[in-house]
Amino acid sequence: MRVPVRWFAATILASLAASSVESQAPPSQSTIAETLDSWISNTEKNVVSAAEAMPADRYGFAPPTTIGEFAGVRTFGEQVRHIAALNLWMAALINGVPAPPEVASEIGPDSLEAKPDLLRYLHDSFSAVHAAVATITPDNANAPIPSPSLWQRTRLSFAVDVVAHGFDHYGQMVEYLRMNGIIPPASRPAKKATTGN
């Protein structure tokens, strides 16, 4: 019995692809910092992919008031800037350093409106959070530190806020994308491996 060469090649390629997926180890979670960082990475992946998916000319989009109670809500770009500003604020609190007023107010610089600038700001904010979270240890995770919040007073709570806040606004970004006919990247079906003919 002869096995077609194409079938044999496709089988080999499929098995190699499957083994490479299986060989990708999940992020290490052996320390508090690694566990927090893995959650922040997951938040970053979803938020950044949503921010990248919206066309630049739709960054000023906000849902119209004709379809519900949307008066005064943030535009898509303002959502991105708000997430980044809070990230930078939480990183500053973890590091015990003062944050600029536009960060502590969770607004971010008004000068940032264009998609490339906002994406850079968002990327930089997650980099700052990753660096800050790397300093969290079992000894300092729950040690009280000065904070403007009555209930968030530890490095651990600030790091958790990045995840909770990021996904809160990610949900809004998803709705904005769908209102513009865009399927969020995280909701798109996985691409099947092609064998070529």
Image (spheres, rainbow, N blue to C red):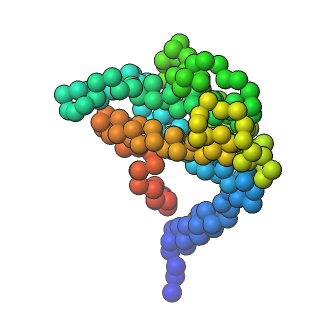
Confirm whether residue 16 shows in the render: no
Q: Residue furthest right?
A: 139
View extreme (bottom): residue = 1
Of residues 187 and 75, the one drawn nearer to the viewer in this rendering: 75
**Residue positioned 51% across, 22% down in the render:** 107
Q: For the point 28% across and 29% down, which residue is it?
A: 70
Near-viewer residue (151 or 38): 151
Residue 27 image point, x, y percent: 68, 56
Q: Is residue 75 above or below residue 177?
A: above
User: With 32 as the anchor, is 191 left or right in this view?
Assistant: left
Left or right of 187 in this view: 30: right
Kindly identify the residue that appears in the image at 72 percent across and 37 percent down: 145
**What residue occupies the far top of the structure in this picture?**
111
Numbered-mark total: 0
Whether 160 is drawn above or below 16: the answer is above
**Residue farthest toward the left in the current orientation of the protein:** 66
Residue 124 falls in which quadrant of the image? Answer: top right
Q: Is residue 57 above or below residue 127?
A: above
User: Where is residue 161 shown, x and y percent of the image?
Assistant: 57, 42
The image quarter in which residue 91 lies: top right
For the point 59% across and 34% down, the residue is 149
Which quadrant of the structure image shows residue 177?
top left
Confirm whether residue 65 shows in the render. yes
Q: Residue 54's x, y, as percent? A: 42, 32
